[in-house]
Image (spheres, rainbow, N blue to C red):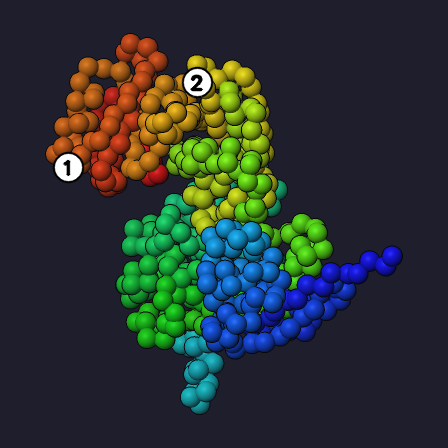
Amino acid sequence: MRRTTVVFKILISDPLSEDGIYPLRQADNLEVVIETDLTEEQLLQRIPEFDGLLVRSQTQVTREVIEKGHNLKVIGRAGVGVDNIDLDAATENGIIVVNAPDGNTNSAAEHTMAMLMSLARNIPQAYLSIKEKKWDRKSYVGVELRDKVLGIIGLGRIGAEVARRAKGQRMKVIAYDPFFTEEKAEAMGIGYATFDQVLEEADFITVHTPLMKETRHIINEDAFAKMKDGVRIINCARGGIIQEDHLYDAVVSGKVAGAALDVFEEEPAVDHKVLTLPQVIATPHLGASTVEAQENVAIDVSEDVVHILSGGLARNPVNIPSVPREIMRKIEPYFYLSEKLGKFLAQLDAGAIEEININYAGDLTALEIAPLTQNTLKGLLSKYVGARVNNVNASYLAERRGITVHENKTSAARGFTNLMTVEIVTKDATRRVSGTLLNGLGSRIVKVDDYSMDVIPEGHLVLIHHQDQPGAIGRVGNLLAANDVNIATMQVGRSKIGGNAIMMLTIDRPLTDDEVNQIREMEGFEKVTKVDL
C-alpha cells in the first residue's frame, strides 16, 4: 500500500525573499502560503489552518494568535530578536520557536568597520560639504587606523569578526568579555584586557554586547572619564549600551573626538541632541540591512522549519521544547532551585569560567537531570547574555564560550534528602554553592564554598568575607542601619575560631556602590559581593 506524505501548511506573513524561502519550496511535505500585511483580525482568522508561521519583526505573534493556531508546530523568526513572539505562550502550547542568530554576523561586522573608517576619515561630513558646493580639504583631516588601539567590549560572533577585520587594518586589538581568557586572546592574536583597561588604552572603542541590566549604560559618565582624550566611539550593537546624554557631554567637552552610531536607545532618533554635533555620524539601524543578510536569515530559519516538520532537530531553537508530563511533574519543583544556584554563582565575580560541574545527590539521582542542568546553565549565563539564553540553547552557548560542563550523580547527600551542588572553575579560583528542596519549606542554599548556610535564594543578598572577630556582625548591622538598610535575615559561617568567616544577609533593598565600599573599608573585611536573585 502506498504511503501518503503528510503535507504541512506554512504561512509567511512578512516579506521574505524567494531565495530565502527556497528550502521551504523544495520540501515535498510543505505547502507555502504568502500573505503579508495581514491585520491582527485577519491573522487570527487565517492561523488555525497552518502548521508553521514565518515572520520578521512586523507580525505580532501574540498569545491570542498562538492559541488560535491549533495546528501550529513551529514559529520561525527570520532574524535575531523574538520580542514580537510570545515565547511563554508558544512553550505552553508545545510550539517550537526558531530564529537565525548567525545570518547577519558578517553584515553587522562590515557595517561596524564601515562606520569606524568613516569616523576616522570624516567621510560623511566631507560628502555633505561637497553637496553644498564646497571644496574644503583642511576641515576634514582624519586619522589613520594603522597602529591605533581598537578596544572591543563584547567578543561574541560579531565582536570576533570585527577583531579579525581590524587586524587586517594593522590595528592593535584588545578586547574584554566575561568569557574571554588570555589563552583565547593568544589564539586569536589579540590582547586580553579588563573592562577598565579597554577604556583606558583604546583609541577607538566599539561595543558588541547584548542589552540587559548589566550592560545598560555601561558607557557612561564614569566610563568616559577613564578614556583617553580624543577617543572615538562606535555602537552598532544595541541602543542603550551607551548613555547618549553623557556621550553628548563628552563630545562637547572634547573628551570624545567623535562617535559613530547605528543604534539608539529610542528609535527613530532623528531629534536626539547628539545628532546635532558635527563630530557624530549615524545610520538608521542598518547593521543587518544587506541583501545577503536578509537572505541568510530567511534561509537559516527556513531550513530549521523543514527539519522540525520532517521529524528532525532545530539548529537554533529559542524556547524550551515540551517535556513529557510525568517527567516534568517530578523535576519541576527543582527548576526554581537550579536556576537560582546558577544565578548566585554568576554574581561571585570569580573570573572567566572554564568549567562547570553539577552534582546531583539523594532523590535527585532517580530523576531526569538534563532539564535541570540546562536550567542551571540558563541561570548562570543570564548575567552575561541576558534573555538570549534559555533552556534549549544554554548548553550550546556554554560550548561556544569554551566552557566544559560535567554532570555527576551520587548517593551521598550529606544528611539531606536531595542535594544539588554547582561548581565553577576559573583560571584563578573554584567557587561552589549547594542547595536543597526542603519538604514544605521550599528551596534553600545550604552551603557556599566550604561554609554551611541556610538561606532562601531570593531577593537582595549580600555575601561578606571577613575575619572572625568579636563585633564584626554588630559593625555591619550598625553601618546598614545608619544607611537605612533593613536586614531581613542573617546567616554566618566560619572555618575556625578567629579564622576566615562569611556572613550572608538578606536585605530589603540592594546596596549602593558607596555602601558596599563602606563595608569593605572596615577593618577585617576582605570582600563584599552583592547578589540579586
Front position in the image: 85 or 407: 85
Front position in the image: 72 or 458: 72
Which residue does the image show at 51% across and 75% down from the upper left? 42
Question: Dot 1 corresponds to which residue?
Answer: 483
Measured from the top left, where is residue 395 in percent x and y?
57, 41
Say what amino acid the circle numbered 2 marks. Answer: Phe
Does residue 151 appear to the left or right of 445 in the view shown?
right
Q: Tell me the quarter of the picture where residue 458 sits.
A: top left
Residue 416 — which label? 2
Q: Nearer the viewer, mark 1 or mark 2?
A: 2
Measured from the top left, where is residue 509 in percent x and y?
23, 40
**Placement of the C terminus among the 4 image quadrants:** top left
**Label 2 packing within 10 angstroms: few (<14), some (14-19), many (20+):** some
**Label 1 packing within 10 angstroms: few (<14), some (14-19), many (20+):** few
Which residue does the image show at 30% across and 38% down from the upper left? 459
Mark 2: secondary structure? loop
Q: Tell me the quarter of the picture where residue 107 sits.
A: bottom right
Does residue 36 appear to the left or right of 284 in the view shown?
right
Say what amino acid the circle numbered 1 marks. Answer: Asn
